[in-house]
Image (cartoon, rainbow, N blue to C red):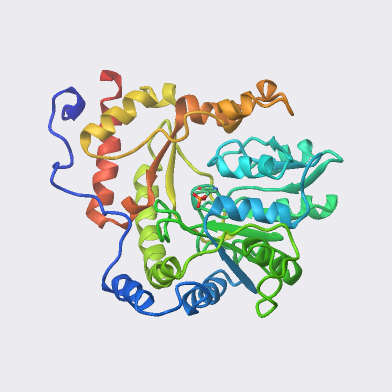
């Protein structure tokens, strides 16, 4: 069989350089009109847009309460503070996530304890169980890439030890576990609307929960520790901060949310084309599926390369894919506990931590495609499969 030469080695690329992938963020006249509407009003703060977005987002996740804020990072810190977690407490987090999941724990004075992933790329519930000590005050798994972690096991573990499960749902807008919205399966959950995220206003965050008491506390903490809406302005109950979402951001988010259902469907259809096209390729593994995920957001399309079974290194795979026109990346370069900020801490010796699955993902096997790729056409998806098949066929030349 003759195979065409890889673009990296001088052959013709599968994708013509003029053939673009979908851009991100996406907006249209709706966002422009909504921004002007706020601009021309006299209420740039505490206006109707934040309330409108919170009500719409609560409904979208099936939550009793949504409290908006200015980032996913602030959301995580505020939830931990609201739960009274601080010095001397431990919180279980995965080591393969954005830094905020773990740094939020440090910011409230508590200690993040890293629990490795299983082949779902989410926190392994059995390892979480082993990591629990009398000091553990919360479990904070991440629904990585939109793949919801095993919330049945996490909740069972949490309730057996009397500790809450906080869902880092920053990749899981609209996700459903057995028809239940992410963020409402555990005690609460938080979301990010930062520029790279599937629903975005450039920056932004949100917390959802069905726990009214927690919602009240979180609301106060995002709003300078104030009392309930309507209470005196210069009257402060809690040590809060100003982490409020602005009317301008909320105006954009209302529009983005209107597009979300359609985008979720398109990404899911395209992901299933990729799943089918890539399933049979030796040496390439997808995130383990679960039929309890009744709707999956796709923030990242994740691939794990087994170098020896596939026939080339991840580094060469990525170089070859990029040369063929596919913007795949190698993901996080190191587990969070290896970041300088953690290695330099004196409160806990992170130099002894070892999470083999995560270390393998970072060092040699993990790869992602960003979500906007999954907004492409069916032809785009077939191009991706062709590119990866071409690399497989030529792996020995890399
Ligand atoms: C983006 C992200 C955050 C933080 O959100 P920001 O809005 O950027 O502060 C937290 N956790 C995960 C998993 C994320 O991807």
Q: Is residue 165 visible?
A: no
| Percent x, y of residue 193 | 46, 58
Give the side of residue 340 with respect to residue 364, left or right. right
* Viewer can see residue 88: yes
Q: Position of residue 376 (x, y in %)?
A: 27, 56
Looking at the figure, which quarter contains the C terminus?
A: top left
| Relative image position of residue 215 (x, y in whole percent) | 69, 68
- Vertical arrangement, residue 21 with respect to residue 103, above or below: below
Residue shown at 63% from the left, 40% from the top: 102
Residue in the picture at 72% in, 37% down: 127
Residue 60 drawn above or below residue 146: below
63 on left or right of 171:
right
Left or right: residue 73 compared with residue 347:
left
Residue at image coords 26%, 25%: 394
**Which residue is nearer to you in this view: 75 or 228?**
228
Q: Nearer the viewer, residue 217 or 358?
A: 217
State which quarter of the image contains the N terminus.
Answer: top left
Classify residue 164 by image quadrant.
bottom right
Q: Residue at x 52, y 28 (%)?
A: 334
Horizontal placement of 26 versus 170: left or right? left
Snapshot quadrant of residue 187: bottom right
The one nearer the camera, 217 or 368, is 217
Camera-side residue of 257 and 69: 69
Q: Position of residue 97 (x, y in %)?
A: 55, 41
């Amino acid at each position: 069989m003759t195979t065409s030469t890889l673009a990296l080695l001088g052959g013709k690329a599968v994708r013509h350089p003029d053939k673009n992938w979908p851009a991100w963020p996406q907006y249209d006249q709706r966002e422009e009109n909504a921004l002007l509407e706020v601009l021309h009003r006299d209420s740039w703060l505490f206006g109707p847009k934040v309330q409108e977005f919170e009500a719409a987002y609560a409904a979208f996740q099936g939550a009793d309460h949504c409290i908006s804020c200015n980032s996913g990072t602030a959301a995580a810190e505020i939830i931990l503070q609201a739960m009274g977690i601080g010095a001397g407490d431990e919180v279980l987090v995965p080591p393969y996530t954005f830094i905020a999941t773990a740094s939020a724990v440090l910011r409230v004075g508590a200690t993040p304890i890293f629990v490795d992933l299983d082949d779902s790329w989410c926190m392994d519930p059995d390892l979480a169980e082993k990591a629990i000590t009398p000091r553990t005050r919360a479990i904070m798994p991440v629904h990585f890439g939109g793949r919801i972690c095993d919330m049945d096991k996490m909740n069972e573990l949490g309730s057996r030890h009397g500790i809450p499960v906080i869902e880092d749902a920053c990749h899981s807008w609209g996700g459903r576990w057995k028809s239940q919205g992410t963020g409402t399966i555990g005690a609460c959950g938080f979301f990010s609307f930062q520029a790279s995220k599937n629903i975005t206003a450039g920056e932004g965050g949100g917390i959802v929960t069905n726990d009214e008491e927690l919602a009240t506390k979180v609301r106060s903490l995002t709003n300078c520790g104030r009392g309930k809406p309507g209470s005196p302005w210069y009257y402060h109950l809690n040590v809060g901060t100003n982490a409020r979402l602005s009317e301008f951001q909320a105006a954009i988010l209302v529009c983005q949310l209107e597009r979300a259902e359609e985008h979720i469907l398109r990404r899911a259809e395209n992901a299933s084309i990729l799943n089918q096209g890539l399933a049979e390729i030796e040496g390439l593994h997808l995130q383990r599926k679960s039929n309890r995920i009744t709707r999956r957001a796709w923030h990242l399309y994740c691939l794990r390369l087994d170098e020896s079974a596939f026939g080339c290194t991840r580094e060469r795979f990525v170089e070859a894919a990029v040369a063929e026109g596919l913007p795949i990346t190698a993901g996080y370069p190191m587990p969070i506990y290896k970041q300088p900020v953690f290695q330099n801490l004196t409160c806990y010796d992170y130099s002894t931590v070892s999470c083999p699955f995560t270390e393998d993902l970072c060092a040699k096997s993990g790869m992602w495609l960003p979500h906007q790729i999954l907004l492409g056409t069916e032809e785009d998806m077939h191009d991706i499969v062709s590119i990866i098949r071409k690399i497989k066929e030529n792996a020995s030349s890399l």
